[in-house]
Amino acid sequence: MQVRIYQPPKNAMQSGRARSERWLLEHEPSAPRQVEPLMGWTSSADTRSQLRLWFDSKDEAVAYATKHGYMYVVAEPHERRIRPKSYGDNFSYTRKGRWTH
């Protein structure tokens, strides 16, 4: 059984970083999804794809996967680069492009 361990990115609708330090363990799909012909719903026989386990650290998630005998892949998060900006830079003489509305 293959699982993936990663830190999901923050939602685009959130401004803060709360609850973004947690790690998520998800099972890889083992059965393909099928479209039900009458209603058009998408379904799968794989119930483990609905299971999402949250952990406080990467080590806890890896320990859980090894304890239960899962093969795991750890996806390291990308570092967030913050470039300091100021409002006055919009009107600077050293600005490369023109300022327009």
Image (cartoon, grey):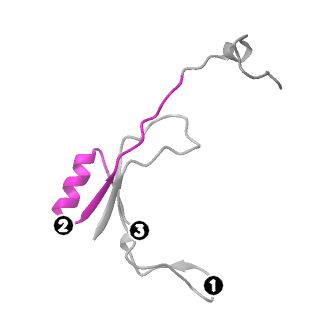
Please name the amino acid that badge 3 sits on: Gln
Residue 5 horizontal side relative to residue 45, left or right: left
User: Helix or strand or loop: what does disc 2 sit on?
Assistant: loop
Q: Is residue 35 above or below residue 95?
A: below
Q: Which residue is mark 2?
A: 69
Residue found 27% across the figure and 44% down from its top:
57
- Residue drawn where x is 55% and y is 35% of the image: 15
Which is more N-terminal, label 2 or label 3?
Answer: 3
Q: Kindly identify the amino acid type of the residue bearing the numbered disc 1.
A: Met
Extreme-bottom residue of the structure: 38
Task: Find the residue positioned furthest to the top.
Answer: 93
Q: Which element carries disc 3, helix, strand or loop? A: helix
Question: Which of the two discs, 1 and 2, labels the residue nearer the N terminus?
Answer: 1
Residue 71: x and y in percent read 24, 64
* For residue 32, side relative to residue 30 (left or right): right
Is 3 part of what is drawn in magenta?
no
Q: Position of residue 7 (x, y in %)?
A: 38, 47
Q: Is residue 51 above or below residue 82?
A: below
As shown in the figure, which amino acid type bears the numbered disc 2? Gly
Q: CA distance from mark 1 to mark 2?
A: 38 Å
Q: Name the residue beneath numbered marker 1.
A: 39
Disc 1 is placed on an element classified as loop
The residue segment tinted magenta is: 55-83
The picture places residue 81, in percent across and down from the top left corner, at 48, 31
Residue at 37%, 40% (x, y): give it: 21
Foreground: disc 3 or disc 2: 2
What whole-number distance in Å separates the C-alpha atoms at marks 3 and 2? Answer: 19 Å
Residue behind mark 3: 50
Looking at the image, residue 41 lies above or below residue 84: below
